[in-house]
Amino acid sequence: MGSPKTVVAGRFLLTDSNGAVRAVLGVNEQGEVMFGLSDARGNIRADVSVTAAGLPRVELCDSAGNTRALVCVDEQDAPAVSLYDSRMVRLVLRVNAEGPFVALADEQSRRQVTLVATRDTALALFQDPGGRAAVVAGIGADQTAGFSVAGPGDKSRLQLAMRGDSTAGLVVSDPAGTITTVP
């Protein structure tokens, strides 16, 4: 067996038989180590990189160069996956120390559905296009299950809850803020 050989360079390019660059391995101006894979037209379609801060990421792009999927790990070592339409992020999946998080967004990238689960709680939040909380449903650490419906101005108009001891409560408020409670 021959001795190991070392090649030192700032950037490596892999070309096809037509001379088109199909892969790049190097360090960019921002100090990121990246490995990019291109299609036959030279468009980067997959990029595996480590940022200057040491954070890993994998980005997948469509034929127009738009990010369609991003997988990364943040500063707290929490992994996340983001999926995009041709312009905006539409779905985010994340797992951190508290638990998993899922967010669904509209075509303007406004979050409309959020699901969160922690050790003691589960929560679903449905928002209107303006970003106000419209409906919240969940189970708390004290085993209380309930939901709340908010009207304009994020004011809760209806709350229904059932406690762990099976007692239930209902709170209704009108636009003027008058509250009616049903034990």
Image (cartoon, rainbow, N blue to C red):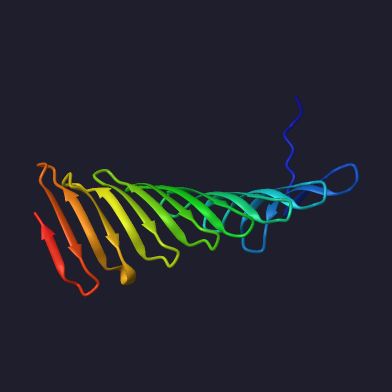
Locate the N terminus by quadrant: top right
Front one among 140 and 136: 136
Residue at 14 percent across and 46 percent down: it is 163
Residue at 22 percent across and 50 percent down: it is 146
Residue farthest right in this picture: 18
Q: Is 107 placed left or right of 146 in the picture? A: right
In which quadrant of the rendered view does residue 182 lie?
bottom left
- Position above or below: 130 against 71: below
How many marks overall? 0
Q: Position of residue 49 (x, y in %)?
A: 61, 50
Residue at 53 percent across and 54 percent down: it is 90
Q: Is 13 placed left or right of 137 in the picture? A: right
Q: Is 153 placed left or right of 169 in the picture? A: right
Q: Position of residue 118 (x, y in %)?
A: 30, 46
Locate the C terminus by quadrant: bottom left
Q: Position of residue 84 (x, y in %)?
A: 58, 53
Q: Is 129 placed left or right of 57 in the picture? A: left
Front one among 27 and 170: 170
Front one among 3 and 10: 10
Residue farthest bottom in this picture: 176
- Position above or below: 28 against 62: below
Q: Position of residue 82 (x, y in %)?
A: 53, 51
